[in-house]
Amino acid sequence: MVFEVLPTPAQVRATFESLDAMVCGKKVDPFSIKRVARDGELPLSFAQEWLWLIHQVNPTSAAYNLPSAVRLQGAIEIEALERSISEVVRRHEILRTRFADVDGRASQIIQAPAEIRFPIADLSALEAAEREAEASRLVTEDARLPFDLEQGPMRAFLLRLGEQDHVILLTVHHIVSDAWSTGILIQEITTLYEAFRRGEESPLPLLPIQYADYASWQRSHLQGDRLDSLVNYWREQLAGASNVLKLPADHPRPDVQTLRGAHKSFNLPGGLSDSLRSLSRREGTTLFMTLLAAFQTLLYRYSQQEDFCVGVPIAGRSFAETEGLIGCFINNLVLRARVSRDMRFRELLRQTREATLGAFAHQELPFEKVVEVLQPERSQSYSPLFQVIFDFRSTPREQSQELPELSLSAMGSEMGTAKLDLVLDIWDAGDAIVGSMEYNTDLFDEATIGQMLSQFQILLDSIVEQPDARLSALALDTETERQAKLRVEKEREVSNRKKLLNIKPKSVQLPAKESA
């Protein structure tokens, strides 16, 4: 759906309801997913196949680990916790699936359910400070431990810090999970734990399908006229698009892309967050679209590149049956930005809105198929089509949960990895907008990323004050910083002029006259 003029309020509501349905996983497709037999070879989904190939190239990397470390404070019943995790693994076949090479092809092999008994590391005898430090070290160490996917995609580990203080470490590989799935995993464990602690049976409903059914459906569904329609859309949208965003980096790009990284967090002031929401309402856009257009502006100002692509992850759950499933449903959409120094921000925002609506309407084609269709020039030095991701979420990153006699809180860990050059994660936490920038440390220094995030905030301030300003005129520096740069430039100009004035012309020696 594309608007040539500003939509009416009714059109905006209808559009956003449709967009919310696609983002949040409400059923928008008339086709249904059927169960398939388990007596034959089970194919991988397109996303799984992509992740499996990445794993084959770099099997010792933990870049695609999804760790969850939850601190449990209060009286804990370990047997009930183990039984809860065992039940979740029984319910979701994907968590007990290993991935093997069968005649050169990746294949899913579902294992029979088994009782989980996780190892326990007892740190309770250590002094308080040493105990906390060791717990943090073990959480990070476990998060960075790579998987052997032929053996399995999940592990569980328990730290005992005290009689009523524990940390449960649950780590899964991205090939069987995503951010949505992590929420399901934690919620089901807490629900089951409370039931089992009271001596009750599982209150969770039966799952209508399993991930293997979805993977088989995806393979059979994406063909014929539907596939042609999706392919034609993406081929038209990305025809002639640049394959590489050339951001100025602190270090030369390695010949082979590395996955070493770090992240830096930020918080936008509450007043700025409210102003961005107000601007979005006035312009008939979502906060997601406004922030994406602002980020595209920042990337343009850094690179001076007028045509580039940014990746945008989406939930990829178009069926009601998939909402409660653990699995890798996430898909990356490729959003193209075409800008110029004279373009006004409002123009870019309209372009971003139209591109977003069109992309979400054609989200069924997996990113892996887009790459296959477009066949961009491939290099081991960078990922195809985009090297930067913009990931927006409308819920806080971390939420504490409570159970009778037990308090749950998340423990973070520094993975030390980066999937791409830059990944900007933003959460609308309600009272403010917060987030972090994941960056490849072989390209960028921490100080550079800190400056980029600072300039992003200044840019956002400038946008809400002057949404009609040209992209080249929007501020990236504070007034003090601008004046300082002007002084440096003026001093450099004066110095250069003095050097020119001090240059004396060389004397020219005429040849002597020949005597007669």
Image (tube, rainbow, N blue to C red):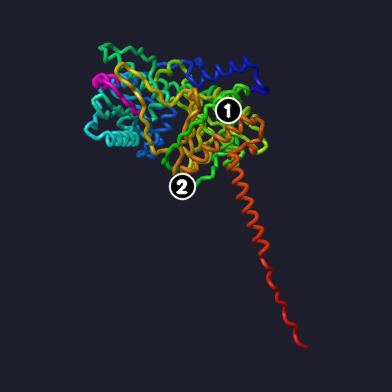
Q: Nearer the viewer, residue 219 or 167?
A: 167
**Rendering coords of residue 471 (x, y %):** 63, 36
Q: Nearer the viewer, residue 281 or 361?
A: 281
Question: Residue visible at 51% across and 15% down?
Answer: 30
* Helix, strand or loop at mark 2: loop
Q: Residues within 10 Å of mark 2 (few under 14, many from 20)?
A: few
Count of numbered tags: 2
The answer to whether residue 94 of the structure is visible from this angle is yes
Q: Residue furthest front?
A: 480
Indicate the quadrant containing the N terminus: top left, top right, bottom left or bottom right: top right
Say which label, 1 or 2, has the lower sequence index.
2
**Rendering coords of residue 322 (x, y %):** 43, 18
Q: Which segment is the magenta one?
A: 68-84
Residue located beneath label 1 in the image = 290
Q: Residue furthest left?
A: 125
Q: Is residue 181 above or below residue 444?
A: above
Residue located beneath label 2 in the image = 255
Q: Residues within 10 Å of mark 1 (few under 14, many from 20)?
A: many
Q: CA distance from mark 1 to mark 2?
A: 35 Å
* Helix, strand or loop at mark 1: helix
Please check the rendered image and state whether residue 102 is part of the magenta-colored stretch, yes or no: no
Q: Residue furthest bottom?
A: 516
* Residue mark closest to the camera, 1 vs 2: 1
Q: Is residue 350 above or below residue 59?
A: above
The quadrant where residue 176 appears: top left
| Amino acid type indicated by mark 1 | Thr
| Amino acid type indicated by mark 2 | Asp
